[in-house]
């Protein structure tokens, strides 16, 4: 995991149905663990783009121990406040019914920038994106991931 992974488009090639991929995205953003470095997200499924499904996760704040620690620091509270409402979009790009493979893309589509390069709560975005990757790997341990 790189420090700038949240700025890249994560392109997946998964042996799964489009619906299974969409479910993995939602599960990755809404799963709850106390120690997970991630965030609280609401997920809504949007209109199919070109007939293929897509979903958007909207950041609601930090999750787990980090959420409790945030209230103890004014700087952490300010950082989280700037990040609220950031959007992570997941869409199915294509599906080959003959091979059962689905191509998907995940990218942060709306984020706040400080000093042009700093993304508030980026480490929590990356944690959540890695949770989605983990859910997709449970479906297909051999999935291919390219970050562009």
Image (cartoon, rainbow, N blue to C red):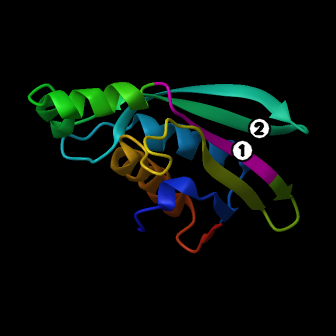
**Residue farthest front in this picture:** 115
Can residue 73 be found in the magenta stretch?
Answer: no
Answer with mark 1 or mark 2, whichever residue precedes in sequence. 2
Can residue 86 be found in the magenta stretch?
Answer: yes
In this view, the mark in front (1 or 2): 1
The disc at residue 47 is none
**Residue farthest left in this picture:** 72
Q: Is residue 30 left or right of residue 106?
A: left
* Residue at position x 20%, y 33% in the image: 75
Q: Position of residue 93 (x, y in %)?
A: 80, 52
Q: Position of residue 56 (x, y in %)?
A: 62, 32
The disc at residue 53 is 2
Q: Is residue 94 above or below residue 35?
A: below
- Where is the N terminus found, in terms of image quarters? bottom left
Q: Position of residue 30 (x, y in %)?
A: 42, 34
The image quadrant that residue 139 belongs to is bottom right
Main SS type for the magenta part? strand
Q: Is residue 77 left or right of residue 131?
A: left
* Residue at position x 28%, y 48% in the image: 37
> Can residue 86 be seen in this snapshot?
yes
The image quadrant that residue 65 belongs to is top left
The residues colored magenta run 85-93
The disc at residue 91 is 1
Q: Is residue 110 above or below residue 93?
A: above
């Amino acid at each position: 995991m790189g420090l700038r992974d949240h700025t890249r488009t994560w392109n997946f090639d998964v042996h799964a149905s489009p619906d299974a991929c969409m479910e993995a995205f939602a599960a990755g953003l809404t799963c709850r663990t106390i120690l997970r470095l991630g965030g609280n997200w609401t997920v809504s499924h949007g209109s199919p783009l070109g007939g293929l499904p897509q979903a958007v996760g909207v950041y609601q704040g930090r999750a787990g121990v980090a959420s409790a620690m945030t209230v103890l620091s004014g700087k952490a509270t300010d950082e989280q406040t700037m990040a609220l409402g950031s959007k992570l979009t997941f869409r199915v790009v294509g599906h080959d019914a003959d091979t059962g493979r689905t191509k998907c893309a995940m990218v942060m589509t709306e984020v706040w920038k400080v000093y042009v390069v700093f993304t508030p709560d980026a480490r929590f975005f990356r944690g959540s994106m890695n949770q989605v990757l983990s859910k997709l790997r449970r479906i297909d341990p051999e999935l291919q991931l390219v970050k562009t």
